Amino acid sequence: MLHFPKKACWAIALWPLLASAQTQKFASHFPFEATNVPASVKTITDGRPWLSKERGPVDGLMVFAQEKSGAVWLGGDQGAARFDRKASHPWDRWQYFHGRRWLLDNSVQNIKVIESTGVSRQVWIRTKTGVSLIEWRPMSLEQKARYFDDRIEARHVRHGMVADSRLRVAGDVTSSVTSDSDNDGLWTAIHLGLISAAHNLNKQLNDTRNKNADGTYKGFPGEPNE
């Protein structure tokens, strides 16, 4: 059984941060003929050579677009990259986008940036086989936790435990299959620990999908957290 202090002062102190909205990156993919794809990104354009002394994550990058902040978007035959010389954190100075998670293919032929008056940002990237949209959406930490909890429910539950998942068809999440590993107990324990911590903070569970009538959890051995 997992025990947590009744007075979670640290959680109360962090609650404004937990509730505040930050931005998270999402990627979507479209065919060229999709009506919501901006016409300006459908054409093939020639980027400007990257002449900075600071080398990018890969060779052969060309500059295709620039944000209002001065950050630039580059692309080539090995994916896309964002460079922000004003970034407050070294991790944000270069951001590299490669592979099916972000792009339909890695041959970048055009980039279009659309910025709203808020914190949202849309980056449309044309490649040989279609157009990919990378966007920054406002999301609180609570919403982010819910997003990953739904993902666990959809593709990572095996016999009531949190398990590894792989795709039989690359890029097709409907082809997901679970498999056992030595880490199942670890992932499940972490998941249960977070559920218990949330319950201790909120004094109630907002999500009761895995809860049994006696207070235990489906697939989770142990006593009720109450």
Image (cartoon, rainbow, N blue to C red):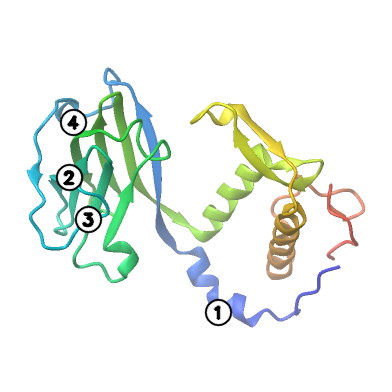
Labels 2 and 1: the sequence-earlier one: 1
Q: Point out the frontmost of discs 3 and 4.
A: 3
Q: Residue at x 67, y 79 (%)?
A: 8
Image-quadrant location for residue 90: bottom left
Would you say 222 lies left or right of 133 here? right
User: Where 136 falls versus 12 (above or below)?
Assistant: above
Labels 3 and 4: the sequence-earlier one: 4
Amino acid at the residue labelled 2 = Gly
Q: Point out the frontmost of discs 3 and 1.
A: 3
Would you say 172 lies left or right of 62 here? right
Q: Disc number at residue 13?
A: 1
In depth, the one of 150 and 142 nearer the eye is 150
Residue 119 seen in render: no
User: Farthest top residue?
Assistant: 33
Residues at marks 3 and 1, CA–CA distance in whole angstroms: 39 Å
User: Where 178 falls versus 1 (above or below)?
Assistant: above
In depth, the one of 203 and 134 nearer the eye is 134
Amino acid at the residue labelled 1 = Ala
Amino acid at the residue labelled 4 = Val
Image-quadrant location for residue 41: top left
Image-quadrant location for residue 114: top left
Labels 3 and 1: the sequence-earlier one: 1
**Disc 4 designates what residue?**
41
Q: Residue at x 31, y 62 (%)?
A: 92
In depth, the one of 81 and 157 nearer the eye is 81
**Disc 3 designates what residue?**
56
**Disc 2 designates what residue?**
60
On the rendered image, what quadrant is the N terminus found in? bottom right
Labels 1 and 4: the sequence-earlier one: 1
Crowd class of label 4 (few under 14; some 14 to 19; many from 20; radius 10 Å): many
Q: Residue at x 60, y 43 (%)?
A: 151
